[in-house]
Image: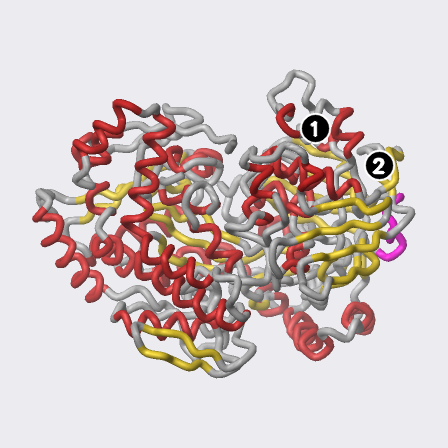
């Protein structure tokens, strides 16, 4: 049975906007809040995203080839973009940066947590010149896949007069909520804990999948059974480095069972609906079976591990670096109060596992030797790590920054406190003034380079079913200024697809981004879809149906081009793919168009008028947008969005709702687990980093019935 807590508030007001008051009132009389919330979520989801779901289910047909699957997924994502339940904003990178870390000395894999593992970094004692970073980037492009880049980079830096060090210091802005990576879906947890354990396979700094705690593996002829042979002699230790036990195959069985028991939000990735489809995982999670030995993960002996899938999964091995496949020592977990199956109870008085770094076991390159809340996290080299002689960095220090001082990262970089920094509008201006030593060069001219973009897609979500009008962790904070009548009218408006499109088309994303990174680079990191346009391409010529016309896309066609073909066929003026752009779907604004926004709003006004909802300057729709008010750049960004929308759309007012600090802003939506907790109408603080190398890693997050992790950002499930 699913372990979920569900309730609904302002129920009558919300369902009125869908014209279903009587039917739902009757249902509500017989149902508890949990059941009512599920009914509402299903109705709202189907009304807003039914076309996406229908198209996506066709793409999930197991009889399809990989290329057919990719093509139909692109079609379904086009429908998702047309539904305008979320607006793509930007990706990481694409801004000016300065660094003591050499580019590409850690993995830049587009999925999983391997890019957050720092043991192979090359870090200099002095800032690395921008010209040298560019030279290293070019060398990486040439040497990728040869295994030669790391030594080349070491030699190059030495020849250029740099001295390498074995420490790395960076900034962070949120403490892990738990140190139990198997029980969490938050990036802030996984990015920290991934340095404390090692998985079966790991992407190296050339983005080649390499053996880690598995030395080799085989796949059955039918592609459903994966057998991994484990490295012997690897040890589990505690936070003091004291040996606990050897690492064995049973640790992956225990880890998978605990992940399924904890239901931290990512268990769908191993199920059949939204993941790789390990045999009987869904049945175990749903309570249909209670014996975990019936699930398709087995320890054949101490050093042989086997996964059995329901059907072939083309992306299975790309998932190995992600937290859901982390090992966990069963005996240590139980010694910390942990239990399995129906007995699992993290609220028990004796349950300590993952509550802090002293209550987890380690088998990775680092031990956490300091974790002071909102201050410092220190990772120190694990002397028992199996590959300890090969790590480059022996101490990683994370320093907390709440974002209130926009100049602090730059000033700390100059002072040698931090080893890298991005440049925002304020620090960029200062970097063009400050000179480095007696060189006569400014910091900007000497050290700046443009950072690479990533596969992480940050989106702005529209709350389709808002029930929270203050932060649920503290109802005195971030309180909506809307009246009861305003709330009903806003919910009616966002239930209309043309209103949602109008809102999305009215957001000047370039101006929004310029408030953070400056005018010069305001377009660089803009993303126009959820899945990047160049994420995958077709392996063979593929014919699919586009609105009744058989359409053939040749081998090599990028995902984004197929998405664009469907958008064009449907006549929805969104551009997600431009062959003239280097990244194909990034680096331009394919959404912002005030004329399109006005046209969509005109349709919405007429349709809503027929439902008794007037939209005009005298009777506007209010859209609550929370923002971190103690951060100058984020404040400016919010005001740019507000101004752009209100200039383009008469009868729409954006309420810029101030959050006193980063924590309040996070609790508006990012920290929340369920849709009913989302305290906003429009939210620009959430995104998705793919877990594996397939478009379903993005699109599965938008599935209904608690399967899709990101649907909660829409106020449902």
Q: Which residue is rendered at x = 71% and y = 52% of the image?
A: 117
Query: Can residue 636 be seen at all in this image of the molecule?
Result: no
Q: Mark 2 falls on what kind of element?
A: strand
Q: Position of residue 163 (x, y in %)?
A: 81, 62
Residue that carries the numbered disc 1 in the rendered image: 353
Residue that carries the numbered disc 2 in the rendered image: 237
Nearest to N terminus: mark 1 or mark 2: 2
Compared to residue 661, the image places residue 311 above or below, namely: below
Q: Position of residue 61 (x, y in %)?
A: 48, 62
Distance of mark 1 from mark 2, alpha carbons? 14 Å
Query: Can residue 154 be seen at all in this image of the molecule?
Result: yes
- Magenta-highlighted residues: 384-390
Which of the image's four quarters has the C terminus?
top left
Q: Which residue is rendered at x = 77% and y = 56% of the image?
A: 227
Is 332 left, or right, of 452 in this rendering? right
Q: Position of residue 661 (x, y in %)?
A: 45, 35
Compared to residue 245, the image places residue 542 above or below, namely: below
């Amino acid at each position: 049975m699913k372990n979920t807590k569900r309730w609904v508030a302002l129920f009558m007001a919300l369902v009125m906007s869908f014209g279903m008051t009587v039917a739902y009132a009757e249902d509500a009389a017989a149902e508890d809040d949990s059941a009512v919330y599920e009914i509402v979520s299903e109705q709202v989801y189907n009304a807003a995203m039914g076309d996406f779901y229908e198209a996506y289910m066709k793409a999930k047909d197991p009889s399809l080839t990989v290329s057919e699957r990719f093509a139909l997924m692109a079609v379904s994502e086009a429908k998702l973009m047309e539904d305008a339940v979320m607006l793509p904003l930007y990706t990481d990178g694409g801004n000016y940066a300065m660094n003591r870390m050499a580019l590409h000395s850690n993995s830049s894999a587009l999925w999983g947590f391997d890019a957050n593992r720092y043991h192979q970094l090359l870090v200099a004692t002095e800032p690395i010149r921008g010209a040298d970073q560019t030279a290293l980037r070019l060398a990486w492009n040439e040497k990728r896949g040869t295994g030669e880049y790391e030594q080349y980079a070491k030699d190059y830096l030495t020849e250029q007069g740099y001295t390498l060090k074995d420490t790395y210091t960076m900034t962070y802005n949120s403490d892990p909520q738990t140190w139990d990576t198997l029980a969490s879906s938050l990036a802030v947890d996984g990015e920290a804990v991934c340095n404390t354990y090692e998985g079966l396979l790991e992407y190296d700094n050339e983005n080649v999948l390499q053996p880690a705690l598995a030395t080799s593996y085989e796949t059955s002829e039918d592609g459903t059974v994966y057998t991994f042979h484990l490295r012997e002699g690897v040890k589990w230790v505690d936070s003091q480095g004291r040996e606990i036990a050897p690492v064995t195959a049973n640790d992956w069985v225990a880890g998978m069972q605990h992940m399924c028991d904890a239901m931290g939000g990512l268990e769908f990735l191993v199920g059949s609906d939204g993941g790789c489809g390990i045999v009987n995982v869904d049945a175990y999670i749903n309570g249909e079976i209670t014996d975990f030995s019936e699930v398709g993960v087995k320890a054949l002996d101490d050093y042989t591990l086997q996964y059995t899938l329901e059907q072939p999964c083309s992306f299975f091995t790309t998932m190995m670096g992600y937290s859901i496949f982390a090992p966990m020592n069963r005996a240590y977990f139980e010694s910390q109060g942990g239990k399995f199956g129906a007995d699992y109870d993290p609220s028990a008085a004796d349950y300590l596992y993952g509550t802090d770094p002293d209550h987890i076991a380690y088998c990775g390159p680092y031990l956490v030797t300091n974790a002071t809340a909102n201050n410092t996290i220190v990772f120190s080299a694990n002397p028992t790590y199996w590959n300890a002689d090969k790590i480059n960095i022996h101490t990683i220090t994370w320093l907390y920054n709440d974002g209130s001082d926009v100049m602090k990262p730059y000033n700390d970089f100059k002072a040698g406190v931090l080893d890298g920094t991005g440049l925002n509008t304020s620090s960029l201006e200062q970097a063009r003034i400050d000179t480095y030593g007696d060189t006569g060069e400014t910091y900007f001219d000497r050290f700046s380079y443009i950072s690479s973009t990533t596969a992480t897609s940050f989106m702005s979500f529209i709350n389709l079913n808002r029930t929270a009008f203050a932060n649920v962790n503290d109802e005195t904070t971030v309180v909506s200024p809307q009246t009861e009548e305003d709330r009903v009218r806003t919910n009616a408006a966002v239930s209309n697809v043309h209103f949602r499109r109008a809102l999305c088309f009215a957001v000047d994303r370039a101006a929004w981004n310029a408030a953070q990174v400056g005018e010069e680079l305001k377009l660089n990191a803009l993303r126009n879809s959820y899945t990047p346009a160049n994420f995958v391409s077709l392996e063979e010529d593929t014919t699919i149906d586009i609105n009744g016309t058989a359409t053939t896309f040749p081998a090599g066609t990028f995902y984004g081009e197929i998405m664009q073909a469907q958008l064009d066929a449907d006549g929805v003026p969104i551009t997600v793919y431009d062959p003239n752009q280097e990244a194909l779907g990034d680096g331009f604004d394919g959404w912002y168009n005030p004329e399109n926004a006005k046209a969509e709003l005109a349709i919405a006004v007429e349709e809503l008028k027929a439902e008794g909802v007037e939209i005009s300057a005298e009777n506007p729709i209010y859209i609550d947008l929370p923002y971190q008010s103690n951060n100058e750049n984020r404040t400016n960004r919010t005001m740019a969005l507000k101004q752009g929308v209100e200039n383009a759309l008469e009868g729409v007012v954006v309420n810029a709702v101030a959050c006193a600090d980063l924590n309040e802003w996070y609790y508006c939506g990012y920290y929340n687990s369920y849709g009913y907790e989302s305290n906003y109408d429009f939210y620009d603080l959430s995104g998705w980093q793919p877990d594996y190398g397939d478009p379903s890693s993005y699109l599965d997050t938008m599935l209904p019935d608690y399967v899709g992790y990101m649907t909660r950002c829409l106020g449902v499930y």
